[in-house]
Image: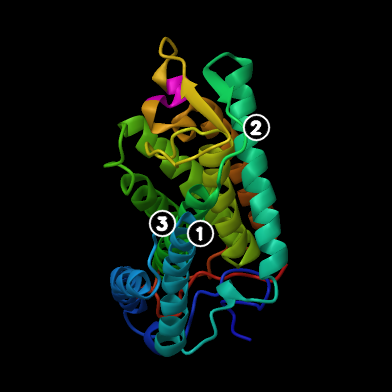
Amino acid sequence: MNKYHSAGSGIALGDRRVLQSGRLRWLRSLAWMVGLFALVLLAIGPGMTMVRHILPTGTPQLAFLANVISGAIAVIVYALMVRLGEDRHPDELAIKVAPAQLTAGLTLGAAMFGTVMAILMTFNLYTVDWLGPAPAWRAGGHAIQAALIEETLVRAILFRLLWRAFGPVLAFSGSAAVFGVSHIFNPGATIVSVLCIALEAGIMLGALYALTGRLWVSIGVHAAWNFTQGYVFGAAVSGRDAGPALAHSIARPDASVLLTGGSFGPEASLPALLVCASIGIGTLWLAWKRHRLEIATGSISDGRMGSEAAPTVAAA
């Protein structure tokens, strides 16, 4: 058991092969981060082309399956590259705990967004028209795809390897900034929406990963939030229409965009920011209490960040 990770107690940062201790590990971590990010991202396109060739997506059910497979491709490629490049099993994707942690994440994500909408409706900031039963294939497929791909890219790669290189502070701030900016070209996006995405999902989902050492809770929260937003309430998801839904929700045109999120959707609203910040701060506090945000002493003082200086994840 190495001093940087205790099984089941926090993030496995990696300390072998490309991430082994020694000179310039911080630089090797950054190079590996960029390369791994590019490899996973590049695998998704050809993978989806192959899936669509083998599995025509003419029906909602097949389109749903294609979206799920594309998300799974990202996870599988990541796991294979970690095994090859870091000489370790990807503990962050441990199958044994996946059912329980996914269930917890799905429950939390749905409850969080339900709370956001309850606040928006209570203060008459949104109008919600209930439409009745609707097929969930499109919204479900997009929610699962986004959760698998984005959590792999942003949390497993950017967040983890920034932590490996520089520690938790830059891991949280850097990955959150990238996650927020990645939504800047979405329909209806504003500086406020980018900041909300960064502060809400970027910090909160990173905190859940740090606390559990697994991606499953973060994946579950991400998928359930998007699904509840787009399918249950029929609101815009990061500025986009999620397809058929049980309801149709729109922001009151006379209400402040800061309160409602405007055309970008409720995730850019003040209530969403408050709800996510509360969960994120609570999760960070719990991770801190369990010593999962610690950094080994002397990490930068020797002038060779990463030589014997990696962030530690202590046992609970």
User: What amino acid is found at the position of numbered circle 3 in the picture?
Assistant: Leu
Q: Is residue 96 left or right of residue 272?
A: right
Q: Position of residue 238 (x, y in %)?
A: 40, 39
Q: Is the residue 303 above or below the residue 101 in the image? A: below
| Residue located 33% across and 75% down the image | 50
Label 3: which residue? 170
Report the Cα–Cα distance between label 3 and label 1: 41 Å
Label 2: which residue? 115
Label 1: which residue? 61
| Residue located 41% across and 13% down the image | 253
Q: Is the residue 165 above or below the residue 269 in the image? A: below
Mark 2 falls on what kind of element? helix
User: What amino acid is found at the position of numbered circle 2 in the picture?
Assistant: Thr
Mark 3 falls on what kind of element? helix
Magenta stretch: helix, strand or loop mostly: helix
Q: Residues within 10 Å of mark 2 (few under 14, many from 20)?
A: some
Discs 3, 2 touching: Cβ within 8 Å: no
Q: Quadrant of the C terminus?
A: bottom right
Magenta highlight range: 258-262
